[in-house]
């Protein structure tokens, strides 16, 4: 009974040990992560060694430094606002020279305006803050999220 | 009997204990999985925040209903058991257990927490309630899993369907949203637009693009249009001739190109060859031609040196490409050469067409016109050897020319490129990256690289090089990733832009076909988008007399856009027929008729005051000043019907969702007043006022 005992020993110690550790490695730490691991994934794409993720690179480049919300705001701005306020908000849009008073340069005035003021102007028009009627109200057809997106874009571009 | 020494006993106990202890530990771990912890924690936080909200509301008066509701919610929450949550979706063929950990996903009070306690961002769950959609149909991953790793959160090796990363998430929307414009997914929308514009469906079967006209022109009678020299240059690389050609660069050797050119220019127009056109012996007047060119608004569709429309070919160096005879004939009757062309058949006289031809041949060339007569006359159709014809036809089919170009005599139903129905589900193992080793191997990277440079993985690839920008390649990749193997039942797909049937027959059908109205205008969702206003209700919008005069001689209604309605030189009879038809058929009953009769003079004054108060002049020209954003309003009373002005002012976005016209929230009286004022702005009134 002693000799077979030495034969059984590896089966009792070594194999469970090996399987335990290999499960940890192969399963990708599955057992450990069963516990609350509130890991936030950064875009989820691990770069393997030094390989390039070409699509992600091109995508990030095309965003020219803007977040998703700011990009959305940029779209709205280009469509609704740029024709008077200019593509960069300098008050030099195609229609700006027909307006009296002319739109001001955003870079000079936006930093001092708070979000609530900007929201009011965009949704209710410039009359709601005591200015001319030339910039109309848009609250009836621009969603809350859309106006927030425009504001975030304006802030980003006019620091 | 064997002796068992104390040493052996010791070893036996140690090992036995180790086994027992590890079993207990494992059992313990199994009984306390992550999801239980998450659910308990989430419940705790939800109850705390709910209680805080109840407390806050109790302090406010008149909040009884809300309070009652909240107390009910709290009671339900307290009774919630900790168990596996699953959403069983038979029609989508899946079971999602994501909510076992992400149990608070719909509770908007948890916006600021970290995953998995954080609630879903935006309004997505309002539009797609989890009990109907589940989670994996948008997010991918393994719905049945109940722990972090098995659900394939992140880039976990060997899982077929890992969770879609945030960057690529918008392509999932395209699985169910089948319109060209996909909400909340600008890249997919733009991608579908690029596919439409580039004509990828010429070689590939692509879902949503199954029924399309061939993207290229017919190649019949090509020999009457261009000479072999030009065609050789073009086939070698279309960018030799155009900056932004629609045709891709094909992968053919110079010899093959030569053979193909010979074959293609051997096809000539019988009429051009046989008739001696007397008028062509004369010389047209390019100065008059220039005026006619401008009047006909050719640049609404064509571009000249990059400026103008994008619907039709660039004309900046057209004189280098086509010959004078052909151009004259084409301008007189485009449909003879291109039956499916979008170009209308203008009502030019011979003399007018000659003048325009002369102007174009003189003005739109960038180099010395080489002596081409000899070349084009060299080979007639009967003079090609049968072997050459056979070889060329083989090439024509083999390289997919027939997918984009019609050519009589060559019939094919098969597209040479692989079909893209399930490209979004293509397995990584079936993708060949060729010699490219420094790129992360993923489906999206492969598609992106392939679309940008089709020869990158295989020098001999037949796919044409479209010279796409990075942005366009990204957009196409996103659009293609939406085409997966998953079967989405009809109850889930969203297709709002439905096309109605519009197939007029008889005289109207003939006029619509001759003048190709639908190249620019839309009726019932059919047609082009060059004109931003569909024709479906034009009879309710504009006055009949005005429409007649406008069709006869269009003018600029909107000052700031370059595209204008073409002057088609319609005959009186044709104009009358079209006007009658449009004013009686293209009508919408929701727009009130006869509003003019109810307008009073007092309304006009009130309307004028409102016009000033709301600063309408910032966008519209009125009197001697105003803005360039909207249409000019002098004489708008001659153009628009009162009912339409009223309906438009009350809710512009209903008729044109992306219009720049604001919705001021006018009540009925205000809208009537403004309508009365605008209706009063007629030519008659202006003349009375100035006299």
Image (spheres, grey):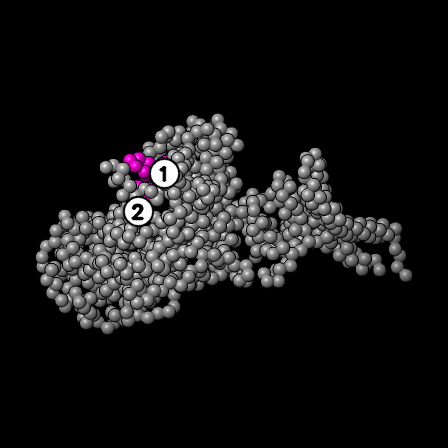
Marks 2 and 1 sit apart, C-alpha to C-alpha, by 20 Å
Q: Which residues are magenta?
A: B615-638
Going by the picture, which residue comes out furthest to the right? B1
Q: Count of labels shown?
A: 2
The percent coordinates of residue B5 (x first, y second) are 88, 53
First along the sequence among labels 2 and 1: 1
SS class, disc 2: helix
- Image point (49%, 61%), residue name: B422
Residue B16, horizontal then vertical, whole percent: 82, 52
Residue of label 1 = B619
Question: What residue is disc 2 on?
Answer: B638
Q: Where A14 falls versus B616 (above or below)?
A: below
Compared with B65, B389 (above or below) is: below
Quarter placement of the N terminus of chain A:
bottom right
Please report contact status of discs 2 and 1: CB closer than 8 Å, yes or no: no
Residue B630 colored in magenta in the image: yes
Dot 1 falls on a residue whose secondary structure is loop
Which residue ends up furthest to the bottom in the rendered image? B386
């Amino acid at each position: 009974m002693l000799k077979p005992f030495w034969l059984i020993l590896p089966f009792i110690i070594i194999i469970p040990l090996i399987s335990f550790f290999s499960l940890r490695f192969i399963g990708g730490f599955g057992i450990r992560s069963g516990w609350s691991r509130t890991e936030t994934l950064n875009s989820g794409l691990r770069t393997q060694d030094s390989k390039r993720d070409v699509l992600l690179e091109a995508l990030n480049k095309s965003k020219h430094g803007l977040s998703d919300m700011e990009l959305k705001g940029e779209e709205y701005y280009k469509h609704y606002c740029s024709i008077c306020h200019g593509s960069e908000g300098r008050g030099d849009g195609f229609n700006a020279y027909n307006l009296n008073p002319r739109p001001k340069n955003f870079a000079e005035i936006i930093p001092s305006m708070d979000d609530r003021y900007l929201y009011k102007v965009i949704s209710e028009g410039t009359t709601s803050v005591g200015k001319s009627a030339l910039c109309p109200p848009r609250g009836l057809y621009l969603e809350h999220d859309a106006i927030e997106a425009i504001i975030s874009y304006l802030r980003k571009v006019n620091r | 009997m064997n002796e068992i020494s104390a040493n052996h006993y010791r070893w036996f106990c140690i090992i036995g204990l180790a086994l027992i202890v590890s079993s207990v530990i494992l059992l313990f771990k199994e009984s306390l999985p992550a999801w239980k912890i998450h659910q308990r924690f989430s419940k705790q936080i939800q109850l705390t925040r709910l209680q805080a909200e109840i407390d806050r509301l109790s302090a406010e008066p008149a909040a009884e209903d809300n309070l009652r509701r909240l107390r009910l919610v709290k009671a339900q929450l307290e009774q919630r058991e900790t168990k596996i949550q699953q959403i069983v979706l038979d029609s989508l063929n899946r079971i999602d257990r994501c909510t076992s950990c992400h149990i608070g996903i719909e509770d908007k009070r948890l916006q600021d927490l970290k995953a998995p306690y954080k609630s879903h961002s935006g309004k997505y769950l309002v539009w797609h309630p989890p009990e109907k959609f589940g989670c994996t149909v948008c997010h991918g991953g393994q719905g049945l899993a109940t722990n972090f790793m098995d659900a394939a959160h992140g880039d976990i090796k060997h899982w077929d369907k890992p969770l879609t990363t945030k960057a690529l998430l918008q392509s999932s929307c395209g699985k169910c949203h089948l319109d060209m414009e996909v909400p909340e997914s600008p890249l997919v929308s733009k991608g579908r637009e690029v596919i439409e514009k580039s004509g990828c469906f010429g070689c590939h079967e692509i879902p949503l693009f199954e029924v399309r006209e061939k993207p290229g022109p017919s190649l019949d009678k090509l020999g009457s249009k261009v000479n072999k020299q030009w065609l050789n240059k073009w086939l070698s690389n279309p960018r030799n001739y155009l900056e932004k050609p629609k045709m891709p660069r094909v992968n053919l050797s110079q010899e093959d190109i030569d053979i193909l050119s010979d074959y293609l220019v051997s096809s000539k127009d019988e009429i051009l060859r046989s008739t001696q056109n007397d008028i062509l012996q004369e010389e047209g007047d390019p100065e008059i031609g220039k005026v006619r060119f401008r009047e006909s608004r050719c640049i609404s569709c064509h571009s000249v040196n990059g400026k103008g429309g994008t619907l039709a070919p660039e004309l900046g160096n057209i004189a280098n490409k086509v010959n004078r005879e052909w151009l004259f004939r084409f301008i007189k009757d485009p449909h003879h050469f291109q039956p499916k062309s979008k170009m209308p058949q203008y009502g030019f006289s011979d003399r007018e067409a000659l003048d325009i031809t002369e102007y174009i041949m003189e003005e739109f060339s960038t180099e010395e016109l080489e002596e081409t007569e000899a070349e084009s006359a060299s080979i007639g159709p009967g003079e090609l050897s049968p072997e050459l014809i056979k070889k060329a036809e083989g090439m024509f089919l083999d390289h997919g020319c027939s997918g984009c170009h019609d050519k009589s005599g060559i019939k094919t139903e098969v597209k040479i490129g692989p079909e893209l129905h399930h490209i979004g589900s293509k397995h990584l193992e079936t993708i060949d990256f060729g010699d490219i080793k420094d790129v992360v191997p993923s489906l999206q990277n492969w598609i992106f690289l392939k679309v940008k440079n089709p020869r990158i993985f295989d020098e001999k690839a037949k796919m044409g090089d479209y010279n796409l920008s990075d942005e366009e390649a990204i957009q196409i990749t996103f659009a293609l990733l939406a085409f997966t193997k998953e079967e989405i039942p009809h109850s889930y797909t969203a297709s709002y832009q439905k096309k109605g049937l519009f197939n007029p027959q008889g005289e109207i059908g003939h006029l619509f076909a001759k003048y190709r109205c639908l190249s620019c205008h839309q009726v019932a969702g059919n047609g082009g988008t060059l004109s931003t206003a569909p024709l479906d209700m034009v009879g309710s919008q504009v006055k009949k007399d005005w429409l007649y005069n406008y069709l006869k001689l269009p003018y600029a209604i909107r000052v700031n856009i370059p595209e204008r309605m073409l002057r088609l030189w319609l005959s009186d009879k044709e104009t009358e027929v079209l006007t009658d038809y449009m004013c009686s058929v293209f009508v919408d009953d929701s727009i009130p008729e006869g509003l003019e009769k109810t307008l009073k003079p007092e309304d006009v004054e009130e309307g004028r005051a409102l016009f000033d108060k709301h600063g309408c002049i910032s966008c519209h020209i009125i009197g001697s000043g105003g803005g360039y954003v909207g249409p000019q309003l002098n004489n708008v009373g001659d153009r628009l019907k009162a009912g339409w002005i009223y309906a438009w002012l009350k809710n512009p976005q209903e008729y044109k969702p992306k219009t720049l016209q604001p919705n001021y929230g006018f009540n009925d009286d205000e809208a009537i007043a403004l309508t009365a004022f605008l209706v009063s702005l007629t030519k008659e009134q202006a003349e009375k006022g100035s006299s």
